[in-house]
Amino acid sequence: MSNPVLVNQIIPESDVVPLTGRVGAEIRGVRLGGDLSDAQVAAINQLLLKHKVIFFRDQGHLDDLEQESFARRLGDLVPHPTQGPAAGTASILNLDSSRGGGRADQWHTDVTFVDAYPKFSVLRGVVIPAAGGDTIWSNTHAAYESLPASLKALADNLWAIHSNAYDYAAVRPRATAEEKKHFEEVFTSTVYETEHPVVRVHPETGERSLLLGNFVQRLVGLSKSDSAKLYEVFQSYVTAPENTVRWRWKAGDVAIWDNRATQHYAVNDYGDQHRVVRRATVDGDVPVSIDGRRSITHVKAAKPKAKAA
């Protein structure tokens, strides 16, 4: 890992533009690609750990393979566990608003229904609406630090069950028939249930972050009703405006975020305008609680395929 002195030597401080007081920075003057020097990659990693999500404009030279070539410099690539990668790629997930699964308009951290969910996500804007289609990120470490001491003590000892099999109709009541079909036949083709600590310790920074999001189904040892009430209390700190940054996309933009310290939300306000973004993901580590216990996947079960009529 690099240190701040090296970062300033490789990427000048004037090219790092913080976007809010707590999360997000735009990085200028860097052309992303697999041919970046080790020092440049180390500097990007350090900026990512500091700002949680970083943005790069004018990266239109990237295609899927070059996007992955760059992402691979940050770690091993991993495909989505149920949707799989785009043809000819190791991890690219095509998020197309005109197809099922293309509008991720709930607060979430990527793929927390598995134990070792992605460390970093690298998202490239391909087709962007003329208006709308922003993405919002939250700093979940800042959310934890915002908690009163009594709520921190409570969160420190809670665990939650995350699953990709949830009440989709309740979460997305306006979902199209195609989106519902994608959820049933693709997104939940294998059902996962994983137990995570509500507070995880970041393996590189040592910071504590809230590990929540829409894949949470219940808190361990509590009723569904009590779980929902406590979830709303903790999640309200995640989504507090002070802990968020909103990015207005342009085609060719790249966003990179640390899933160990963020949640995000794709704003679904662009109607029938077309939006396409493509995501590469970097393999992650199994979360560890403040007392050193590791997350565990309890269920991994393929759904039986529907019989042809």
Image (cartoon, helix red, strand yellow):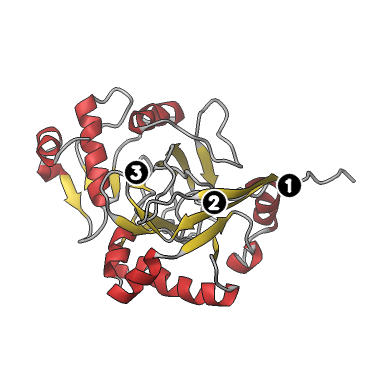
* Residue occupied by mark 3: 256
Seen at 15% across and 42% down, the residue is 15
Q: Residues within 10 Å of mark 2 (few under 14, many from 20)?
A: many
Q: Secondary structure at mark 2?
A: loop
Q: Amino acid at mark 2?
A: Phe
Is there CB contact under 8 Å for labels 2 and 3? no
Dot placed on the residue nearer the N-terminal end, 3 or 1:
3
Dot placed on the residue nearer the N-terminal end, 2 or 3:
2
Towards the viewer: 176 or 5: 5
Q: Amino acid at mark 3?
A: Ile
Q: Residues within 10 Å of mark 1 (few under 14, many from 20)?
A: few
Is there CB contact under 8 Å for labels 3 and 1? no
Residue 11 x/y as whole percent:
15, 36
- Where 308 falls versus 168 (above or below)? above
* Residue occupied by mark 1: 303
Place residue 140 in its image quadrant: bottom left
Seen at 28% across and 73% down, the residue is 149
Question: Distance of mark 1 from mark 2, alpha carbons?
Answer: 16 Å
Residue 42 x/y as whole percent:
23, 33
Is there CB contact under 8 Å for labels 1 and 2? no
Question: Distance of mark 2 from mark 3, alpha carbons?
Answer: 21 Å
* Residue occupied by mark 2: 113
Seen at 65% across and 65% down, the residue is 169
Residue 289 x/y as whole percent:
39, 54
Question: Distance of mark 3 from mark 1, alpha carbons?
Answer: 32 Å
The answer to whether 126 appears left or right of 272 in the picture is: left
Place residue 146 in its image quadrant: bottom left
Seen at 28% across and 43% down, the residue is 204
Residue 269 x/y as whole percent:
47, 63
Q: Secondary structure at mark 3?
A: strand
